[in-house]
Image (cartoon, grey):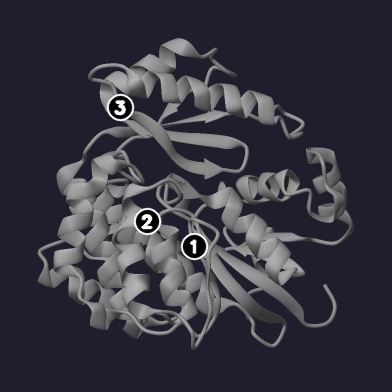
Amino acid sequence: MSGRKTAVVVCPGRGTYNKAELGYLGRHFPDAALLAAFDAQRAAAGQDTLSALDGAERFSLAQHTRGDNASGLIYAATLGDFLAIDRERIEVVAVTGNSMGWYSALACAGAVSAEDGFTVANTMGTLMQEALIGGQLVYPFLGDDWRPDPARKAALLATVAEIDTRSDHTLALSIDLGGMLVLAGDEAGLKAFESAVEPIDGRFPMRLGNHAAFHTHLQAPVARRGQAALALDLFDQPALPMIDGRGAVWWPRSADVHALRDYTLGAQVTETYDFTRAITVAAREFAPDLFIVTGPGTTLGGAVAQSLILADWRGMGSKADFKARQDSEPLLVSMGMAEQRGLVAGQ
């Protein structure tokens, strides 16, 4: 890359701190004092510190993917990567995120302080783990070529809607995630969908372990507890534009802070998170040179690329189109990939 680039930063959500990410904070987090402050918060609450979790000898699926542990680890890894971006080479023009990545986006954009953002992410992750209402699964609607297929998506969503009308069944679109549908509901609803669709590649539909029915009305009790626990004074005007899970932009110096808190602890918890729409708005509103996906993990890049294809951005209509564009001049940088991190991170 040559010259200073503009970038939209994309913050990942749950499911991105896995075995390969063990030690991520130790390798990459740039501010020891800030990490110590996060650890102090968790120690005061009787929780394992991030340093202990990240520095464990072995990755434990049961321990590291729990909401009360995963949320803090992912938030810290995301924020650390954001702080590591080289601002002499990169001008960040906006921030967005996927699902719990919204909490990270708030901190990256300055709408909450780093420590208050940790309080929000850690509190909500803990409350969701304590309640653990329902579950999630993932199912793709795009083929291997990533060409848009609105009819297939509509048919799958019609199946979801029909299942949700059945007695004692709950099922809804949790996250519109590029070429994937993340569905959430109760056990009856999830099982009914699994029975209704064709298996794909021996992987899908894929249940997501330690995940609740995020972004559905089933999370209303969690939203109420979050609203009771997290005060308005944690929130402030953002210093950077933020694109939320509806595709709405929160602009610096003009955001309604009351509305921002209400959204973060209300609709963001209980209504569908439209990540595809957020990326579409980010592309069309800010037209960045780059989309930078922070760590941890490397899985969100595909959803960003698929979202850009679905938006017909810069004429890209397939996976091959995206790959050709990416090969000629990188459009997407994943900081979780060692070979790409150096394109945007300071030395």
Quadrant (top left/top right/bottom left/bottom right) for the C terminus: bottom right
Q: Which mark is residue 244?
A: 1
Q: Secondary structure at mark 2?
A: helix
Q: Amino acid at mark 2?
A: Gln
Quarter of the image where one finds residue 155: top right
Q: Is residue 10 above or below residue 141?
A: below
Inter-mark Cα distance, 1 to 3: 25 Å
Q: 10 Å neighbourhood of mark 2: few (<14), some, or many (≥20)? A: many
Picture quadrant where residue 265 is located: bottom left
Q: Secondary structure at mark 3?
A: loop
Q: Is residue 249 left or right of residue 318?
A: left
**Three-letter amino acid code at disc 3?**
Thr
Q: Image point 10% across, 64% down: which residue? A: 46
- On the image, the x and y values in percent for residue 22 come to 41, 54
Alpha-carbon distance for marks 1 and 2? 8 Å
The answer to whether residue 126 of the structure is visible from this angle is yes
Q: Which mark is residue 268?
A: 2
Residues tagged 1 and 2 counted as in contact (Cβ below 8 A): yes
Q: How far across and down, in percent of the image, does residue 111 sit?
A: 41, 80
Instruction: Locate residue 225 relative to residue 59 in the image: left or right.
Output: left
- Three-letter code, disc 1: Asp
Q: Which residue is mark 3?
A: 170
157 and 291: which one is in front? 157
* Residue 96 percent location from the top left of the image: 53, 64
- Ranked by sequence position, the earlier of labels 3 and 2 is 3
